[in-house]
């Protein structure tokens, strides 16, 4: 208990005297004040070089197109599977409907699915009984 009181009294004395921890290593205020300044010529205004609007890297697109050609015109259900087989055991998610006009159509697929060996399945029937075509992404 005595040590606590002694420590408290010493810290009050240090604060009251204006001493702060580490103040001995600081130079006095007079030493750090700047020397009298002399007038220096102001630089003439000149156009600054134009900088790019942002220096941040461009973010990759969130979706990428997957195009199918040579298909009969119509609307087709598309799924994402882990293999290029139409069996539902390989199903990952349902994608958007593929609309084919003039024997071609495109759907947008999330960029995160690319480069992982996954496959877009285009079903020939709404019952998912037969596969029209596949595309590995």
Image: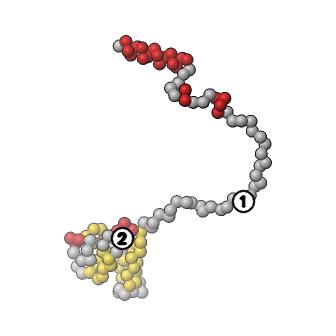
Say which of marks 2 and 1 sits in front: 1
In the image, residue 56 sits, relative to residue 11, either above or below, namely below
Residue receiving disc 2: 114
Residue at the location (30% across, 75% down)? Answer: 119
Image spot of residue 117 (x, y percent): 30, 72
In the rendered image, the vertical position of residue 71 relative to residue 136, given as above or below: below
Residue beneath label 1, please?
47
Is residue 124 shown left or right of residue 57? left
Residue 75 appears in the rendering: yes
Choose the circle earlier in sequence order: 2 or 1.
1
Asked where in the image residue 27 lies, by quadrant, the reply is top right
The image position of residue 15, as x and y in percent, is 52, 19
Residue 105 at x, y percent in the picture: 40, 80
79 vs 102, left or right, is left
The kind of secondary structure element at disc 1 is loop
Report the front residue among 72 and 62: 62
Snapshot quadrant of residue 71 = bottom left
Q: Residues under labels 2 and 1: Cα distance?
A: 46 Å
């Amino acid at each position: 208990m005595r040590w606590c009181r002694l420590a408290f009294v010493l810290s009050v004395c240090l604060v009251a005297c204006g001493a702060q921890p580490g103040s001995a290593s600081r130079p006095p205020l007079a030493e750090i004040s700047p020397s009298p300044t002399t007038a220096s010529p102001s630089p003439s205004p000149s156009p600054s070089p134009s900088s790019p609007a942002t220096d941040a890297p461009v973010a990759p697109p969130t979706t990428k197109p997957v195009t199918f050609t040579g298909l009969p015109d119509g609307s087709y259900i598309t799924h994402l599977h882990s293999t290029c087989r139409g069996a539902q055991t390989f199903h990952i998610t349902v994608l958007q409907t593929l609309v084919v006009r003039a024997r071609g159509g495109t759907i947008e697929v999330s960029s995160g699915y690319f480069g992982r060996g996954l496959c877009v399945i285009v079903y020939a029937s709404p019952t998912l009984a037969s596969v029209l075509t596949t595309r590995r992404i």
